């Protein structure tokens, strides 16, 4: 990291790829384009709409005031000679939080990671910070990927943590301490698998309507004991949770998609962070219009092979549970070579409130 002088006492930092520097009037047009980007409106507290005068006030008045008062250290990010975004370290004392944003044409190149790493190094080495905190809207997977790559401890969802445009929001949270290794703490579990007919990929928000259709189906809800009625918010939570669990290395979730990328069901491999190592638990459901066609058996077979593959998840034992009466699920377990090794009596609560048995299956590598 190189540090140099700049007007307004803003240090210049560079890693040879990106440069952090003070904002200049030449940045304002691109700053205003970024401020009016739909993703900025969706994921940040930037005023909407954002006139150029607001951008100018922010860059030329509010940012310098933050540096002068040491309440916010905000840099312009420069890449290949032009402005591409902002990164800032906010807060006095030993505790700070971080924010970062990129112009739409600069995304997808890891520039936010490079810029944030420079800012965090400055926060720890030059500004005397002990902890840098990361917070983001739940569902902002791009921000989560940056925090994951930088080695933040990912804590979970904090209710009522953000106030933006008068609305209180939940937040994903994480923290990084001085001395922590700046590398991911866990692998991001998001592989793509293919079979003769199917693609197994991470869930996306476009899957939400099909998730609602499947999980609102009475036969799906009967054995899974899902919220009733099952709404779009429930499906969106499921998608967002799949991303979070992938980032922290707990579970991997696949959407089963046909040739038109239409969701046919999901498979989740749970307990991948089990301290014993080498274990996993399989769970799945099928959209009503894909049942009876061998879709889930074909998809699960690909997941089981990936799970046992030393170059895949390198599991040594997989388990699954199927409720009494869930004949379809038990047939899939048999087709995949799982062996029933026991029954737990009265542990499966169905949607109607009754209790039935859970049948326990396992397969060893």
Image (spheres, rainbow, N blue to C red):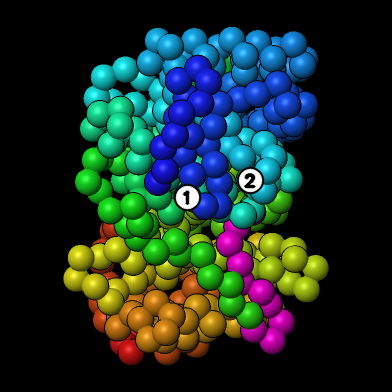
Rendered image quadrant of residue 117? top left
Residue 163 is at least partly visible in this image: no
Return the mark for residue 287. none
In the rendered structure, the answer to whether residue 299 lies left or right of residue 48 reads left
Answer with the quarter of the image where residue 48 lies: top right
- Mark 1–mark 2 distance (CA, rounded to whole Å): 11 Å
The quadrant in which residue 94 appears is top left
Determine whether, in the image, residue 74 is placed left or right of residue 343. right
Dot 1 or dot 2: first in sequence order is 1
The residue wearing badge 2 is 79
Locate residue 196, reporting x and y percent.
Answer: 69, 87
Relative horizontal placement of residue 158, taking residue 136 as reference (left or right): left
Residue at image position (58%, 37%) is 77
Circle 1 sits in a helix, a strand or a loop, which is it?
A: loop
Q: Is residue 123 left or right of residue 210?
A: left
Q: Residue at x 53, y 20 (%)?
A: 7
Residue 96 lies, in percent from the top left, at: 34, 26
Classed neighbour count for the residue bearing mark 2: other residues with Cα under 10 Å, few (<14), some (14–19), many (≥20): some
Q: What stretch is highlighted in magenta?
A: 195-205
Q: What element carries label 2?
A: strand
Q: In which quarter of the image is the C terminus?
A: bottom left
Q: Which of 313 and 73 is in front in this view?
A: 73
Viewer-proximal residue among 189 and 28? 28
> Which residue has dot 1 on it?
15
Residue 314 location, x and y as percent?
Answer: 35, 81
- Reply yes or no: does residue 181 show up in magenta: no
Residue 8 pos. (x, y %): 50, 17
């Amino acid at each position: 990291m190189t540090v140099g002088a700049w007007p307004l006492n803003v240090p210049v930092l560079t890693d040879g790829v990106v440069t952090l520097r003070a904002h200049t009037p030449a940045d304002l047009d691109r700053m205003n384009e970024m401020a009016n980007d739909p993703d900025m409106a969706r994921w940040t507290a930037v005023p909407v709409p954002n006139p150029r005068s607001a951008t100018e006030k922010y860059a030329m008045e509010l940012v310098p005031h933050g540096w002068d008062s040491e309440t916010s250290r905000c840099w312009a990010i420069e890449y290949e000679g032009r402005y591409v975004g902002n990164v800032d370290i906010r807060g006095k004392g030993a505790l700070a939080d971080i924010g970062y944003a990129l112009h739409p044409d600069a995304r997808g190149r890891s520039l936010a990671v490079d810029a944030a790493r420079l800012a965090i190094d400055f926060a720890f080495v030059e500004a005397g910070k002990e902890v840098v905190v990361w917070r983001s809207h739940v569902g902002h997977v791009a921000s989560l990927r940056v925090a994951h790559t930088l080695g933040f401890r990912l804590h979970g969802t904090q209710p009522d943590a953000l106030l933006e445009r008068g609305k209180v929001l939940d937040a994903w949270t994480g923290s990084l301490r001085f001395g922590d290794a700046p590398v991911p703490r866990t692998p991001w579990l998001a592989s793509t698998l293919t079979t003769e007919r199917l693609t197994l990929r991470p869930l996306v928000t476009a899957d939400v309507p099909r998730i609602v259709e499947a999980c609102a189906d009475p036969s799906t809800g009967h054995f899974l004991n899902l919220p009733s009625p099952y709404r779009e918010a429930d499906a969106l939570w499921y998608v967002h949770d799949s991303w979070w669990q992938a980032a922290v290395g707990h579970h991997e979730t696949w959407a089963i998609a046909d040739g038109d990328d239409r969701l046919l069901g999901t498979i989740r491999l749970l307990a991948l962070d089990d301290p014993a190592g080498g274990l996993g638990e399989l769970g799945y459901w099928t959209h009503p219009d894909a049942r009876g066609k061998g879709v889930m058996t074909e998809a699960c077979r690909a997941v089981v092979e990936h799970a046992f593959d030393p170059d895949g998840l390198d599991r040594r034992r997989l388990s699954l549970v199927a409720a009494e009466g869930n004949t379809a699920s038990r047939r899939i377990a048999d087709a995949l070579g799982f062996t029933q090794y026991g029954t737990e009596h009265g542990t499966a609560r169905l949607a109607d409130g009754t209790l039935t048995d859970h049948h326990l299956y396992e397969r060893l590598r």
